Image (cartoon, coloured by chain):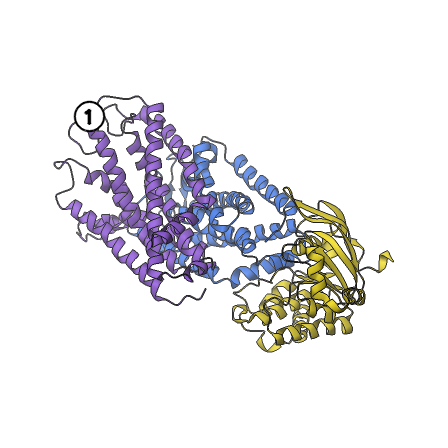
Amino acid sequence: MNSLIQSEWQRMWKRKKTLISLILFTAIVLFDCLFLGVQRFGAFDNIHTAPLTAQNFSVFLLKEVSFLLTLIVAPLLIVDSINGEYTAGQLRLVLIRPISFARLFAAKWLNLAFMLLLFTAITFMIGEFAGHLLKPAADSVRYLNPAQVYDRSEAFIYALQSYGLFYLIVLAELSLVGLVSSLMPNALVSFFVSLGVLIGALYISDTLGFFLMSASVIFQLMAGSYAAPFYGPVLVCTGIGFLATMGVWQRRSWTR
Amino acid sequence: MRQEMILEVGGVTKTAGRRTLVKELSFGVRPGEVCGFVGPNGAGKTTLIRMITGLIKPDSGQIRIDGVDVRQDRIAALSRVGAIVESPIFFPYMSGRGNLLNLARLHGNLHTSAQRKARVEEVLAIVDLSGRGSDKVKTYSLGMKQRLGIAQALLGSPKLIILDEPANGLDPMGIRDLRNLILKLRDEQGISFFISSHLLDELQRICSRFVIIKEGGMVWQGTSGEWVDIAGTRGLEEHFVELMTR
Amino acid sequence: MRALFISELERLWKRKLIWMMFAAIPLIVYATARYYAVHNLQVPLDSPEFVTSGNFPVMALIEQLIVVFNLVSLVLLTLSFTEEYRTGQLRMVLLRAFTVGQLFRAKAAAYLVTISLFFAAYLGVSVAVGFQMFDSSETTRLFHHVSPAGPGEVMGYTLKYYGISLLTVVGMGSAMLALAVICHTTTAAIGFGVGILLLSIGYPLVYLTFNTVLNLQLPAQLAFLSLTQIQYEGIAYLLADSSMGPGPYFPLFALAVVAGYVLLCAGGACLAFTRRDRWI
């Protein structure tokens, strides 16, 4: 299993695409910091705002960056690895080795999970760094729930928790887009059907709105005002998506 | 007798919708044998090769490699096989050596990085690509890609190598190099080959046994000598055309 | 040339994805209608945002124009210009007795026809769904109009809204076309295409913010350099009563922006498509 993951990891980084998207992503995040830097207030939603400080900067940065990550970067990386490599015929050389298909998928999943953790962590680190560089520090911070006051170290934990929740959503997305990519005939269809599923989920039920409205859901969740269940649906999406895709990989016919 | 076969195909059938792709195929390949797998385009050759390598599952029948059933223990069965299915598509963004090193990780018998490096250099030398190993695969000619394909098949020290139309598009030098390589591997390492092709004269020079199929079903099988005898003065090509149009 | 165009159209319409996109129209319109049914409870009866069967086709377009229509346009362009070219399928066509410029124009025409059909189908479905799901009213309030409009005026307004929307989508499509021609893989084309969409959506906010914060005193109208901004607010301005619009020069400005996109991007794409060596 270990060597499977290493082989995936190596291939991923040998693709120019990976490095280019990381560089572009970082550049956009830095620009977002600049954009936030010139503003005085961060908005939780259409109504509620809070003064931007070194302590809450990274949380508002997440709100700006979340769409880029959930709607472009993550789907592209996932579709490329799960669907693109196979439909281009490149995976055939791997499939004829003495390895299990299910484990190969698991290796790809873990590899992508790690990759997405990297993107999330970069955003967090840039956010914390830029926040302290561009904004004054505050002794106490309030977020969406005005009754909860956080001191500096609590605010740091708050930011860390928010990014953690965001990463959980990204993992659920990984499983879902992975499943779509395993069922669709090519990368293009996989990407747009995935996008349709992520956006359409909101129209199906508010419970599944976290894919599209990740930042807003996290704000509400941290404030204790999120009405729909969160952990259950996220874990179910992650788990069921993962297991179903593993089943698909174990049983399918590899005709390319 | 059973134990002696390196590849056993027993009553294998595969259908897709209403179409029967492979129909009740049965044959065997002995250790050290080079077996030619002949049939017109669309006869089901690649479909059978996909089933042998576990990429698709037969509807019925069984396939054993070195006594191991592919369906029951695909991993154990494939550890004895190297293969090229259709033309090999490499990772174009990596060098030839990089491709092999990456794939070598997927073989359980190559644990350490030193072992993998040694094995990759070994197979690169066998296919005579040591000099170009560091170049990106997208700069390779078709013949070099085909040789790299054999190199990747050799990685796991297989007992059986399956080649799907290996001579397709190769120039005469490329075909000669490929032929010599196959014979060398058979003689020096005792590797068996199962080669699909429709270049009959070429196959005749290396194969000791033939399996001929048409529309997914067996038409004829036997040794190279037997076929030459049956074909007589007509030659293999004429006889093959007769078999196909009968 | 006609044969080339028909062959392009035929290949495009053989793709399941195209049919899937058209099949999705009723679902999208229905979902939008459900959204507005809830939204109606929160807006006053005399607001232009209050949805009736009369203004539903326009409201349904407003809700989905920026994301759905631009993405559909991106799919069409990527399929036709990136995938066919980069996978070598186009070699079969390039070897025939046509110039590459003709091929480019045939592809562009096939795209224009298909995206226009998509608009027409969307209009048809939303008229039907509008009558099914919403009450009709004798007069309808339109955005930036002084007095309520009668049925005839609403119909004209709807047609104009769809027409201008189509133009802006084609303008946006020109930028995507340039990317589709340049990119070597479909995933890259999609990535950059969606990227430029997000960029267009984000630009007005960034521009207006910097303008205020840094006190640059640049004209606010420059926010409409972004085509999605024109799609978001500009079309309603273009169709506004002259007393309630943003000024007499706005239509000219908007037209220049759309024309600029088409000329620069589609022209550049045409040059890139026809002048380079074809290593496929």
Q: Is residue C49 left or right of residue B226?
A: left
Where is residue B89 shown, x and y percent of the image? 57, 62
Quarter placement of the C terminus of chain C = bottom left
Q: Is residue A242 left or right of residue C61?
A: right
Tally of numbered discs? 1
Asked whether residue C192 is in view, the answer is yes
Where is residue A64 shown, x and y percent of the image? 37, 47
Where is residue A152 shown, x and y percent of the image? 41, 47
**Residue at 23% across / 48% down in the picture?**
C223
Residue B75 or residue A243, whichever sits in front? B75
**Which chain shows up in yellow?**
B
Asked whether residue A43 is in view, the answer is no
Q: Residues within 10 Å of mark 1 (few under 14, many from 20)?
A: some
Where is residue C240 shown, x and y percent of the image? 18, 36
Q: Colour of chain A?
A: blue
Reading the image, the residue beneath label 1 is C150
Residue B186 or residue B218, whichever sits in front? B218
In this view, which residue lies farthest toward the front? Answer: B233
Image quadrant in which you'd find residue C247: top left
**Chain label for disc 1:** C
Q: Work out whether B144 lies above or below A239.
A: below
SS state under label 1 = loop
Quarter placement of the N terminus of chain C = bottom left
Tag 1: amino acid: Gly
Q: Colour of chain C?
A: purple
Q: Work out whether C129 lies above or below B239.
A: above
Q: Is residue B11 left or right of residue C133?
A: right
Q: Is residue B79 left or right of residue A2?
A: right
